[in-house]
């Protein structure tokens, strides 16, 4: 994506609507803050959703499982 898009609400970009349907959040499906991360495998399956406070390096084991 190369432009600013909405991630929540009626104008949410379709990719974020799909991601949130595949992997809901803890209390709500909405994306609460910047830097929420989704891990998607090469088949397009959402493997995990990670909060904004999760450091990217914490995903390394999950990433290694899918590559």
Image (cartoon, grey):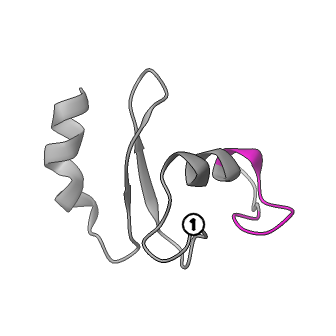
Residue 31 image-quadrant placement = bottom right
Q: Is residue 60 visible?
A: yes
Residue 44 higher or lower than 27, as above or below: above
Horizontal side of residue 64 vs 12, given as left or right: left
Residue 58 higher or lower than 27, as above or below: above
Q: In the rendered image, which residue does mark 1 sit on?
A: 29
Name the residue located 20 percent from the left edge and 44 percent from the top edge: 62
Residue 62 higher or lower than 4, as above or below: above
Horizontal side of residue 28 vs 47, given as left or right: right
Q: Foreground residue, 43 or 27? A: 27
* Residue 42 in the image, given as x and y percentages of width and height: 41, 23
Horizontal side of residue 43 vs 2, given as left or right: left
Please tell me whether mark 1 sits on a helix, a strand or a loop. loop
Q: How many marks?
A: 1
Rendered-image quadrant of the C terminus: top left
Residue 63 higher or lower than 67, as above or below: below
Residue 12 in the magenta stretch? The answer is yes
Q: Foreground residue, 47 or 59? A: 47
Name the residue located 64 percent from the left edge and 45 percent from the top edge: 18
Q: Is residue 1 visible?
A: no
Q: Which residues are magenta?
A: 6-15
What kind of secondary structure does the magenta stretch mostly adopt? loop
Residue 32 image-quadrant placement = bottom right
Packing grade of label 1 (10 A; few <14, some 14-19, many >=20) is: some
Q: Which residue reaches farthest right?
A: 11
Residue 2 in the magenta stretch? The answer is no
Name the residue located 48 percent from the left edge and 52 percent from the top edge: 23
* Residue 46 in the image, given as x and y percentages of width and height: 44, 40
Q: Foreground residue, 26 or 47? A: 26
Q: Which residue reaches farthest top?
A: 43
Horizontal side of residue 44 vs 41, given as left or right: right
Name the residue located 58 percent from the left edge and 55 percent from the top edge: 20
């Amino acid at each position: 994506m190369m432009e600013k898009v909405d991630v929540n609400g009626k104008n949410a970009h379709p990719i974020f609507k799909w991601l949130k349907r595949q992997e809901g959040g803890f209390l709500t499906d909405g994306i609460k803050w910047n830097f929420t991360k989704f891990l998607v495998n090469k088949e397009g399956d959402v493997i995990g959703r990670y909060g904004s406070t999760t450091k990217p390096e914490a995903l390394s084991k999950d990433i290694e499982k899918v590559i």
